[in-house]
Amino acid sequence: MPAPEIVKRLVDTFSNNINFYKSEKYNEAQMRKEFLDPFFRELGWDMDNVSGFAPQYRDVIHEASIKIGGSTKAPDYAFSIHGQYKFFLEAKKPSVNVRDDSEPAYQLRRYGWSAKLPVSILTDFEEFAIYDCRKRPKRNEKASTSRISYFKFDEYVNRWDEIYSIFSKDAILKGSFDKYTIDSKRHKGTETVDKAFLQEIEGWRSSLAKNLALRNAELDARDLNFAVQKTIDRIVFLRICEDRGTEDYKRLASLLNKREVYHNLVELFKEADDRYNSGLFHFSSEKGRGARDSLTPGLIVDDRVLKDIISNLYYPDSPYEFSVLPADILGQVYEQFLGKTIRLTASHQAKIEEKPEVRKSGGVYYTPSYIVDYIVEKTLGNILNGTNPDIENPISVLSAAKIKVLDPACGSGSFLIVAYQYLIDWHLKQYTTDIETGELQKGKLKRHSSGKSPKIYQTPTGEWRLTVDERKRILLNNIYGVDLDSQAVEVTKLSLLLKVLEGETQQQLQRDFIAARERILPDLGHNIQCGNSLIGPNIYFSEESQILDDEIEYRLNVFDWESSFPEVSKAGGFDCIIGNPPYVDLKGFPEQELSYIFKNYSCANNRINLFATFMEKSFSLIKNESGYFSMIVPTSILSQASYAELREKIINEATLLDIARLPNESFGSAAGEVKVDTVIVTWNTPRKPSVSVNLIAYRGYERITSITKDAAHVSGKLSVDYLSQSPDFVWPISTTDEQHLVLKKIESEGVQLDTLVEFCLGFTPYDKYKGHTKKQIEEKVFHADYKKDSTFKKLLKGNDVRRYHVAWNGETWISYGDWLGAPREQRFFTEKRILVKQIIDWGSLRIWSTLTSDELYNSQNAFNLLSKSDISLEYILGILNSKLLNFYHQKRFLDEFKMRFQKILIRDCKRFPIHVVDLEKSDEKERHGKMVVLVKRMLDLVKRASTEGNPSKAKLLESQIASTDKMIDKLVYQLYGLSEAEIQIVEQSNATDD
């Protein structure tokens, strides 16, 4: 597109007066107003907030140039969409050499990297430089390092189309900016700020732990973990406050020139206690507050350890700009950090190791911000914005004060931070704008900014903000969290306290401090508590209580919801329950916990995961008349038999509102480490007459940054009646209404397969619970690659079982007998039988089954079917391998969006509806006979094709196989009485999966 006339005039003006603009007389502020602001207006940005958006939703945030340590406090411009930063722009006066001066480039890259932005701009209008901000900036790097593009003002007109296609507001909304930033060529050598800062604080933990263990012999492991965590949290808090302007800059750094650094650091912490009242700094006994920290002030820490930590936190050596470090990035860092713990050896040396629960769950992962935003919107947003007809509409500020939001497994606090920010934004809107027009309302502004307890104030730049006192009130009224990990609880508190102070200045805090006559921050000891959300005090009245020693009690960390949050119990429960509960298999849990869970949770069984227990627990915590629940959990909740009772409970006791099936590995940067497919389930109470559930589902391979219907592969409605009638209350989210009708017809035309055949899952070779040693299991002592003696039998591998074919690999043998973990009756491996492979074909999701009479043994990679009726196995095999039954299996039992390890489960296979022919009737007997002939032909053709070496003969066999396959499918359609329209529905579904 051609450059606008305004841009042409800007270029001409600069060119005609370049000597003046490059002189020392012309400053940065003038250049921004006269050149940059009009330039970016032509790119579609509302530079002066003419639209009147609330501060957090402005297109462009202008930061005052407050100089700190040689750098500005924040970038000159932050360009954002819907409150999310997209790129920064750092402006310089034209006399600065943008191309060659390394200092401005380093400054910009620190901002962009710390905010985890992909690219940002450095310009003085004369020069325009685009930098990749994904690579960690280093102090002495050249200005050209990580520079993607550079051009001068006289190129703006000719390159306008390029500039517009990347940095215009329209380009960002249409996705071309994101496409530009993910160019693979620009990813070389990248190191994200979260990974770098994680490495940084892990180094602090290691050095502090080792030194504290060395100098303080009386510390046990729990005290050591506490001391290290508290010290790190306090340093991080104060350092972030410095960069945000709420603490004197370099206050921590001033300790570097002193002796006894730790002693002076403790004094600094005590001053912070006087100032903030936060539980983070709680050293003195006070009425109404929890136990004080009497441990850390008396510890000994060597100066060199603390000097190493503090010295690397400041410009110019530090790459971190804490003023722009997003709260979710800090949360990501701490989520990973909390995955490890400090252990003391017998010689009192500190060792860092992964926590057992982290090993069980397969790693630590952080919930991406777009998922958190969606969950908060679906719960808290529904209440505040009046979308629930059972709640006052629109809700008043007075009613909003009664809302209680809970994350029962809060971790580093990511969900609570977003919920808190949502409440802040909502309250600010109530106090400042006309709700219908969104425009500032003078009457509201005056009313809420005056009096003894003002709710809002106006900054020197004209921005309206909530007072710290109002932020504190909202936090204490509305936000609650519980976590089993005491360190996680402290991190949640830290993150929320930083959110209270976000955007404040030291001067404003001092005014608030004087006006309120109380310390600045709240103590969150009541709202955010440490405990086991799932185990209550009733465990003391059970049989398990007899074996609870101090160590077990400490680990269990029993939590009494009623006494811990009496105000919530009195109000009838929590209004919103949100989060990402732990995904940990119950198998291997300590006996006391397992016994308690099985007795106290009706949906619990040996096969479930801990996330399901959190979901069930929520029913007893949520308000019965108007509560909202939304969590991200594994997709196994959709169809796995272990969760049938939980699905039934949700359908019968709540109103299921939304199911959002996310792409596979949606945990972003953790995708390579944590392989888990997830779904967001949202419901509210009580159960109401509901026709349908909102559904969104994405293809497994997609990568998304928001959850919307527009980008989803499937979006629409699911019938609640359909879900309630589904076998085991399975939620087959990819099944349409018309497909559902076909499924019901198929079921009406058949009997369950287990009435016709005898089922047997393959044997289990090893089982530690049956006495097999670790060595026996690791060495596979019953396996061999040749026949060692008469006990050894031919063993099938998974790939040996194909569709209409089985061929032993010729290599694997198993010593078969009672010594195995779980042997089966040998007739299942010697008699005529159907073999069904458990792992189904990944590409087409088709069932692979075959027929054999050979003596072949199989483990649980397949299951075996012996006849117990007059219906021949060939007839059953033809139906099993047909398109119709594959359609039934996929739509009834599979999560079709899952990309890995799809299985045909034996319990599902038993329920397959098989059309039974009446062999007394000639026409049905004829169909039965025809099926037997076709299947025998198919078995023969596939066997011949498997060994055919002549390409032309192989091609002929392939053609014959395809033709026979179609004949079998046609016959099956006839058996089940499907119409042409119904056949088309089945065929279209199979075509999509092939």
Image: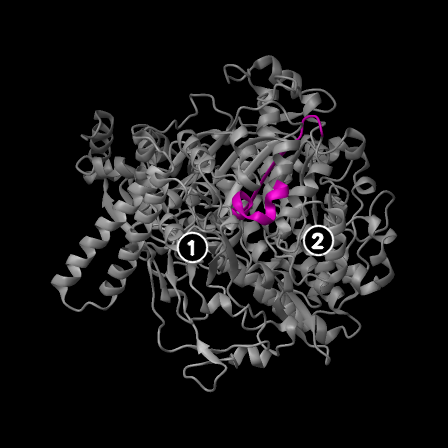
Q: Is residue 629 magenta?
A: yes
Q: Find the magenta span and give its range.
A: 624-646
Toward the viewer: 797 or 818?
A: 818
Tell me where residue 711 appears, x and y as whole percent: 38, 35
Closer to the camera: disc 1 or disc 2? Answer: 1
The circle drawn on residue 484 is: 2
Label 1 sits on residue: 900
Q: How is the image coloured?
A: one colour
Query: How many numbered discs, if any?
Result: 2
Instruction: Please state the horizontal and vertical placement of residue 860, each as a whole percent of the image.
Output: 50, 64
- Where residue 463 appears, as percent x and y from the top left, is 54, 27
The percent position of residue 206, horizontal first and vertical second, equals: 61, 69
**For residue 952, what is the image quadrant?**
bottom left
Q: On the rendered image, what quadrant is the N terminus found in?
A: top left
Q: Is residue 541 left or right of residue 445?
A: right
Q: State the image quarter where residue 706 is shown.
A: top left
> Mark 1 belongs to which amino acid?
Arg
